[in-house]
Image: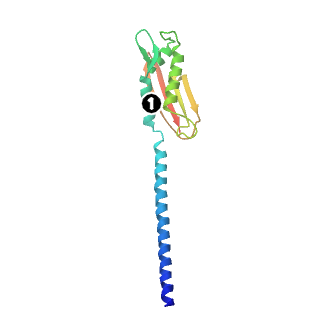
Amino acid sequence: MIKKRGLINNKLGQEEMIGFVLIIVIVTIIILVFLSFSLRKSQNEVVESYQVNGFIQSFLQYTSDCRNDLEYLSVQNLIFSCRDGGTCLDKRDVCKVLNSTLKDIVKESWRVGSGRPIQGYKLDILVNKEGMLMIKEGNETQNYEGSSQDFSRKGEDFEISVIIYY
């Protein structure tokens, strides 16, 4: 009778061990699932070059609050007018309006800071390979995406490039 009780206690102990191991395995699987979701989410925040290209295309069409005799000027027309040394109808310098407009657009579109996926950005406007305007904020890193847009007017070559550091 004593031997039977020892076998029953042994079997109960083995069943408890198997249950404990199953609980550990289930908890490990749950942790791995949560970890994979959190890693996948951070990869989605990486900037793609098509996003930067779309950003350039859209801000060139953005309408500013600078008006000439006929219309409110888009950012692209502000660039041209700045190159020509123009002023707005309300006597503001077009280059200052261009600078402040682009700073606002870039600041709102690519938020920079610690704990954010974007570490910095750089926007350059070149005319005939010479710098016209540069807006830069944050840190330059080894990880970046960029795009550029070229166009011409009156024999001058304009190039806009944007680099986003993440």
* Residue in view at x 58 percent, y 33 percent: 138
Residue 143: image location, x then y, percent: 53, 41
SS type, badge 1: helix
Which one is nearer the viewer's eye here, 85 or 45? 45
- Residue for badge 1: 55
Which one is nearer the viewer's eye here, 50 or 22? 22
* Residue 148 shows up from this direction: yes
Which one is nearer the viewer's eye here, 113 or 102? 113
Which one is nearer the viewer's eye here, 16 or 35? 16
Quarter residue 76 falls in? top left
Q: Residue furthest bottom?
A: 1
Q: Residue furthest front?
A: 1
Identify the amino acid type marked 1. Answer: Phe
Residue 162: image location, x then y, percent: 50, 31
Q: Is residue 61 left or right of residue 92?
A: left
* Residue in view at x 50 percent, y 28 percent: 106
Compared with 126, 119 (above or below) is below
* Residue 127 shows up from this direction: no
Crowd around label 1: few <14 · some 14–19 · many ≥20 (10 Å): some
* Residue in view at x 42 percent, y 27 percent: 58
* Residue in view at x 43 percent, y 32 percent: 53
Residue 105: image location, x then y, percent: 49, 26
Residue 130: image location, x then y, percent: 54, 22
In the rendered view, how is the structure colored? rainbow
